[in-house]
Amino acid sequence: MTVSLEIVRERLRAVPKVDVLARQPSLARFRERLGEAGVMHACRSVIAEVRCRVMDGADMPSLEAAALAVAARLEPVLSARVRRVINGTGVLLHTNLGRAPLSLAAVKAAAEAGRGYESLELDLEAGGRGSRGAYAERALAELTGAEAALVVNNNAAAVLLVLTAMAYGRGVLVSRGELVEIGGGFRVPEVLERSGAHMVEVGTTNRTRLADYERALDEHDDIAVILTVHPGNFRINGFTEAPMLKDLAALARRRGLTHVDDLGGGALIDLEAHAGLAGEPTAADRVAAGVHATCFSCDKVLGGPQGGAIVGERAVIDRVRRDPLARALRLGPMPTAALEATLEHYLARDMEAVPVLAMMRRPVAEVARRAERWSTWLAAKEVRCRVVSTEGRVGGGTFAEEPLPSAALELEADGHTAVSLAARLRSGPTAVLPRIASDRVLVDARTVLDDEEDALLEAVVAACRSNLAV
Ligand SMILES: *Cc1c(COP(=O)(O)O)cnc(C)c1O
């Protein structure tokens, strides 16, 4: 059936204008969060589709239906965009939430670096080319007692780079007990293979002795590196044995090899003295043990931006720095500035300034008082809640299984299961990520930042209330 040109024209005239559609009240939240231009763009393509369909004889959709089509198009865009989330999980270093929150000074430094030009690779005194990260590297060397340091994009990059520079085409000795997957796809054997080195396994899953390394060295003449890996949240209990790091470092030295340690967390201070958290080795311990190159994350217990550090002997660090891969793995200017500011806190011994260190040290009684305050406020708004004691974690592969005593708000709302209430909290205008434990929704008071309290309470009221209107 053919439709006359006149009728088609008539129909097309009735198609809503793009700007009228974009102003629909139901699209307000998209305008707020994605901007006018983003919404207009989606409206234009929806209108173009409507026109095609109308020309083919379809009925004209209502303005609301067209707005729904725009919303359906923008919803995935909105949820893909990175936004602030209030961390109610009690996990201090949550990889899905970007790990360590930065100090105000670090945030300012990163913003300054992003906003203007900076002396990233310029030596202002000499007027010549400087080295990116030189300040952070000097600070890391000082804080760990190492001769030299190098910063790169993350710890995975640090390990890959060191192995490439020191063992490409040669063998790397690793204990079978340390062939772990750290999470997020970092598997020691795979990274090792990508570095161009080949893996030589020693010992057994639970027991590896110095003699095992010695025997492997006698049997293979192409070994360049002895690699040790801090297994993070993977623990073997009971009948285990691993040689002392200083014995391994000494063995590597005797045989002319490089001992590389993947430390993971990168504690720069003794966390047992700081917060009563036992068992996390410091980078300085590794340097003191004689390890040639120690690799760690800057955004785990160190409390800085995403980054990876390599600290150790100058000759090794220099060789790693000259590897062609170093350029591909370098740290960006904004994290470089944030890392410098974070390390400043350490140099000044101002641990309270580093948010992760402040959070892990906060006494549980103080955390509980905070939750009580929230509970009183929320009860006045008729939100059903109570304070419960709970256990958080440091996370990020460090003490991952060690409980961190904490206190949380337990929330309930009529007509909601734990899962649906948690979904409401996540998807509101202020996103809150709670923890669900035994079918209860918990908001841990340890991991909520000081300046987030008001927004959190408003978000809880909105999430628990909104079902009343339904
Ligand atoms: C976390 C971790 C990594 C990966 O570090 P990223 O900074 O996330 O790249 C590698 N090795 C160990 C032992 C770790 O704990």
Image: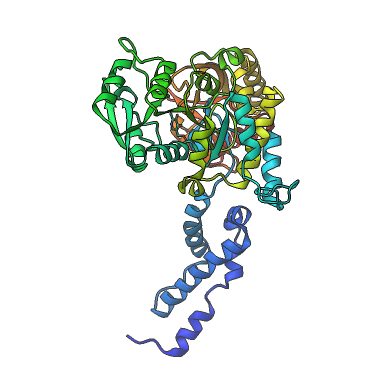
Residue 109 position by quadrant: top right
Q: x, y (%) of residue 235? A: 37, 19
Of all residues, the one furthest to the right in this rendering is: 125
Q: x, y (%) of residue 358? A: 64, 22
- Tally of marks: 0
Looking at the picture, tell me which residue is in the foreground, 429 or 59.
Answer: 429
The answer to whether residue 450 is above or below residue 49 is above
Q: According to the image, what is the colour scheme of the structure?
A: rainbow
Looking at the picture, tell me which residue is in the foreground, 232 or 88.
Answer: 232
Of all residues, the one furthest to the top in this rendering is: 238
Q: Is residue 401 left or right of residue 288?
A: left
Q: Quadrant of ligand 1?
A: top left
Q: Is residue 220 left or right of residue 133?
A: left
Q: Residue at x 37, y 15 (%)?
A: 243
Q: x, y (%) of residue 385? A: 57, 23
Of all residues, the one furthest to the left in this rendering is: 219
Residue 205 in sight here: no
Q: Is residue 198 left or right of residue 414?
A: left
Residue 151 position by quadrant: top right
Q: x, y (%) of residue 251? A: 38, 20
Specify the quadrant that holds the N terminus.
Answer: bottom left
Q: Is residue 4 left or right of residue 370?
A: left
Residue 246 in sight here: yes
Looking at the picture, tell me which residue is in the foreground, 97 or 31.
Answer: 97
